[in-house]
Amino acid sequence: MTRTDAIALIRRYYDAFNAGNAEGMLACLTDDIEHRVNEGAHRIGKEKFREFCAHMGDSYREQLKDMVIFANDEGTRAAAEFVVHGTYLKTDPGLPEAKGQTYVLPAGGFFEIRDDRISRITTFYNLNDWIAQVSK
């Protein structure tokens, strides 16, 4: 895979995210996807990722904007920086009560790519910033 191919793969993944298309996101992943979320659980496999997407879809409505995607020459690693524009829809256990609060949060993702699919996703955002925004 080339750098250009890797960037296109990450773009497809995030385009599916913005469309609320979990199956489109899953199509970009290896079966043994390793999913590491900032301040959250470490998941392995598409089924765990599917469960995560269902939970997120119930609790949050998000659009990622101002996306910039980078990849190495070999197309095996990539990163994306973006701004999350979201609405907190349903209370997530252990977090503040959801009341339809909106938030704008800088975030990023780091990726490993294998066999033309994403094999690892590590997501980063500032949880304290998010909590402060939804607690106002």
Image (spheres, rainbow, N blue to C red):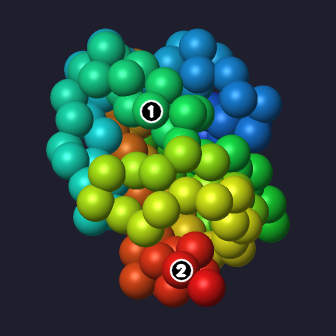
Q: In the picture shown, does residue 56 fall above or below 89?
A: above
Frontmost of labels 1 and 2 is: 2
Q: In the picture shown, does residue 114 fall above or below 10?
A: above
Circle 1 residue: 55
Say which mark, if any, is on residue 133: none
Label 2 amino acid?
Answer: Ser
Can residue 68 be seen here? The reply is no
Say which mark, if any, is on residue 135: 2
**Helix, strand or loop status at disc 1:** helix
Mark 2: few, some, or many residues within 10 Å (few <14, many ≥20)?
A: few
Identify the residue at horizontal 39%, vertical 32% (top origin): 52
Percent position of residue 76, x then y: 41, 42
Percent position of residue 133, x then y: 59, 81
Mark 1: few, some, or many residues within 10 Å (few <14, many ≥20)?
A: few
Q: Nearer the viewer, residue 17 or 76?
A: 17
Task: Please say if the residues under marks 1 and 2 sit with CB atoms less than 8 Å apart.
Answer: no
Percent position of residue 47, x then y: 31, 14
Can residue 52 be seen here? The reply is yes
**Considering the image in quadrants, where does the C terminus appear?**
bottom right
Residue 4 appears left or right of 53: right
Label 1 amino acid?
Answer: His
